[in-house]
Amino acid sequence: AQSVTQLDSQVPVFEEAPVELRCNYSSSVSVYLFWYVQYPNQGLQLLLKYLSGSTLVKGINGFEAEFNKSQTSFHLRKPSVHISDTAEYFCAVSAFGGSQGNLIFGKGTKLSVKP
Amino acid sequence: EAGVAQSPRYKIIEKRQSVAFWCNPISGHATLYWYQQILGQGPKLLIQFQNNGVVDDSQLPKDRFSAERLKGVDSTLKIQPAKLEDSAVYLCASSLGTGGYGYTFGSGTRLTVV
């Protein structure tokens, strides 16, 4: 079975500052890793995903994440945030292969960008 | 392409009443999921369909929840009777397949049980 731990439930940051949202996972098999963003009263939107290859993954809206297998981490970063990045961010994991492969989500991190 | 459609967007019911949610996935997506997202938590899988067959319903409270996907396209999720703890956002998602495809989510149905 897989599990995801998002280490911070809330992250306040000032506009134009860098931000890192932390995610650790646990799995006995190889996994795919995802970050989703949820704006108020909306569904989840895929930011980026790691399937294989380069450990640095670039996504939409200037976000990137780095897969670290030895530390079982997949932290999300942005060098300069905007007010519009205020949202909740979810890290998710899916087992490699198999017919299920459903996404297991962390509890989310609320990013609050202040002017 | 059109996204995942869900209705209604909001629903308020009294406990012990029944309620149904509808989902229309992206055309051609064989896999459909229903997730429950309780306030302050991440989404939790309720049921996964592959075409019109159930792949995983291990976390579906089958004494009160049911779901079907007729003809491998639209899906409905029903709760009967509802409990206060069922208050949540119910998210439908679809994907081309499992594993690395990632999902496309609908906007969800916010259910309030009073």
Image (cartoon, rainbow, N blue to C red):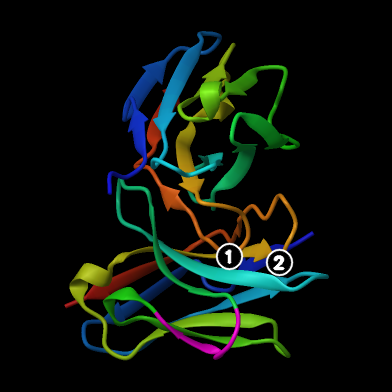
**Furthest-right residue in view?**
A28
Residue B99, by quadrant, is bottom right
Residue B14: x percent and y percent?
A: 45, 12
Q: Is residue B19 magenta?
A: no
Residue B68, by quadrant, is top right
Residue A82: x percent and y percent?
A: 21, 78
Residue A96: which disc? 2
For the point 74% across and 71% down, which residue is it?
A: A26
Q: Amino acid at mark 2?
A: Phe
How far apart are the alpha carbons under marks 1 and 2? 8 Å
Q: Is residue A1 left or right of residue A47?
A: right
Residue A17, by quadrant, is bottom left
Residue B100: which disc? 1
Question: Closest to the observer: B71 or A115?
Answer: B71
The quarter in which the C terminus of chain B is drawn is: top left
Q: Is residue B57 left or right of residue A29?
A: left
Q: Chain of mark 1?
A: B
Residue B53: x percent and y percent?
A: 66, 30
Residue B54: x percent and y percent?
A: 68, 32
